[in-house]
Image: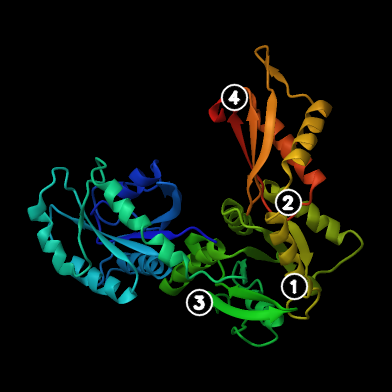
């Protein structure tokens, strides 16, 4: 289950990015005192009182503007509204209630989503400045100061109170598979082949699929949801509103998927943009399958597959656990292996290792390759346990976390992968000092 998504929306220059940075604890959004600075929708995972969620910062909404920049910003904010579980409408106490606030409130009421009104720039609480915001018809407004942190706790309490009801709507038992890739890599053709019907329009013109399309189907008694997404281009190549909107939906599809199938055009080879999108999938901790599509168009000899595998290993060093498939969505070559590969990598992502076996393995690896000493002090591993799954997450308790070099941590991860099949899924390893838990 993906984390609940909380979108911050409102007119420009009301302090949305300042609030975003304050909640996530670091300066991710650029903050400046003139409107229009935030043009990209920004994600960050955070938590409040033990409840994890994803916060989304958006550009300012100006619904009646004809300016090209504002139309782009409006599209990305609309996408955040569409995909969010909870929406925070940011307003400005210093400028007071404006017609732009009322326009946005009308749009939000139509969304049917839980909406909380934050009245920002109230460093000194003044209830008189809150009263006019009741007229928005979105419930009790919250007085906050994003810059100083005042009132943020009460606002986040109200935000997280909406999570349980929203999460209850999640579908049970369905494996959600996102088909992702650059434009014209064959995503819609693959979806049609897997479904056996022409569910998506197939065309050789890049960008035909403008939205993420969900289709449920059953194979062997197991239900899947297939998410066909729009192709993802470099930002510099995204020039029209609809395609920008599509990119954001595709990235959102990655987030809500259980497994991602990333399609690469084998006739073109892996590109810089392919690497970037795979990096996004990796950052989201999603199990994945790399499918080299249009394999029927590639001239082959006995070494062709090995050459492609070597190139993938070089370009995707950060996710060397990838599972490659060589397919043709057009002819159906090996497309029947897609679902079984997805099932396998998802199974690996849910795998749990008994604590006794895990400690025996790690201590054997330590005996085979002792960690190096630093300033006369040597790392000592006391205990290992698996703390989570999806992806598999492990905690290693040591005498001094600063002595764990990244190369030795990588060695231990490789030991885990050699002993157990974690192909297709990332692994998270956290180093903890033993006394922290005593």
Quadrant where the image shows the C terminus: top right
Q: Residues within 10 Å of mark 1 (few under 14, many from 20)?
A: many
Disc 1 and disc 4: Cα gap in Å? 48 Å
- The local secondary structure at tag 3 comes to loop
Please identify, in this view, whether the residue under mark 2 or under mark 4 is nearer the observer: 4
Q: What residue is shown at x 44% (from left), y 70% (from top)?
A: 245
- N-terminal of the pair, mark 2 or mark 4, is 2
* Residue with the mark numbered 1: 294
* Residue with the mark numbered 3: 210
Q: What residue is shown at x 77% (from left), y 45% (from top)?
A: 417
Viewer-proximal residue among 32 and 121: 121
Outermost residue, left direction?
Answer: 128
Q: Locate residue 9 relative to residue 200 in the image: left or right.
A: left
* Residue with the mark numbered 4: 402
Disc 1 and disc 3: Cα gap in Å? 22 Å
Disc sitting over residue 321 in the figure: 2
């Amino acid at each position: 289950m993906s984390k609940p998504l909380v979108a911050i929306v409102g007119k420009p220059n009301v302090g949305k990015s300042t609030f975003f940075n304050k909640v996530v604890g670091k300066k991710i959004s650029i903050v400046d005192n003139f409107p229009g600075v935030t043009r990209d929708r920004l994600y960050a995972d955070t938590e409040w009182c033990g409840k994890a969620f994803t916060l989304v910062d958006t550009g300012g909404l100006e619904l009646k503007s004809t300016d090209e920049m504002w139309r782009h910003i409006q599209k990305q904010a609309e996408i955040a509204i569409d995909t969010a579980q909870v929406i925070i409408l940011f307003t400005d106490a210093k400028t007071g209630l404006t017609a732009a606030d009322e326009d946005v409130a009308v749009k939000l009421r139509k969304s049917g989503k839980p909406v909380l009104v934050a009245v920002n720039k109230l460093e000194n609480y003044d209830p008189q400045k809150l009263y006019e915001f009741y007229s928005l018809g979105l419930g009790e407004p919250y007085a906050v100061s994003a810059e100083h942190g005042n009132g943020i706790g009460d606002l986040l309490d109200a935000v997280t109170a909406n999570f349980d009801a929203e999460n209850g709507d999640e579908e049970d038992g369905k494996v959600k598979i996102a088909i992702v890739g650059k434009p014209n890599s064959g995503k819609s053709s693959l979806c049609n082949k897997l479904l056996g019907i022409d569910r998506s329009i197939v065309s050789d013109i890049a960008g035909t699929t403008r939205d993420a399309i969900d289709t449920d189907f059953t194979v062997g008694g197991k239900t899947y949801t297939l998410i066909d997404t729009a192709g993802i281009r470099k930002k510099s190549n995204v020039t029209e509103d609809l395609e920008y909107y599509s990119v954001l939906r595709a990235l959102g599809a990655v987030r809500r998927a259980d497994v991602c199938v990333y399609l690469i055009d084998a006739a073109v080879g892996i590109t810089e943009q392919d690497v970037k999108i795979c990096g996004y999938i990796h950052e989201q901790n999603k199990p994945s399958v790399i499918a080299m599509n249009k394999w029927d168009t590639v001239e082959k000899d006995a070494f062709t597959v090995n050459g492609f595998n070597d190139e993938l290993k070089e370009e995707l060093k950060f996710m060397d656990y990838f599972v490659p498939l060589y397919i043709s969505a057009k002819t159906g070559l090996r497309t029947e292996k897609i679902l079984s590969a997805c099932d396998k990598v998802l199974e690996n992502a849910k795998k749990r290792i008994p604590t006794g076996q895990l400690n025996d393995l790690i201590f054997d690896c330590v005996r085979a390759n002792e960690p190096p000493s630093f300033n006369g002090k040597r790392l000592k591993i006391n205990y290992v346990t698996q703390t989570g799954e999806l992806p598999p997450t492990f905690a290693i308790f040591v005498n001094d976390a600063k002595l764990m070099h990244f190369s030795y941590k990588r060695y231990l991860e490789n030991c885990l992968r050699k002993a157990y099949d974690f192909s297709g899924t990332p692994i998270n390893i956290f180093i903890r000092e033993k006394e922290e838990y005593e």
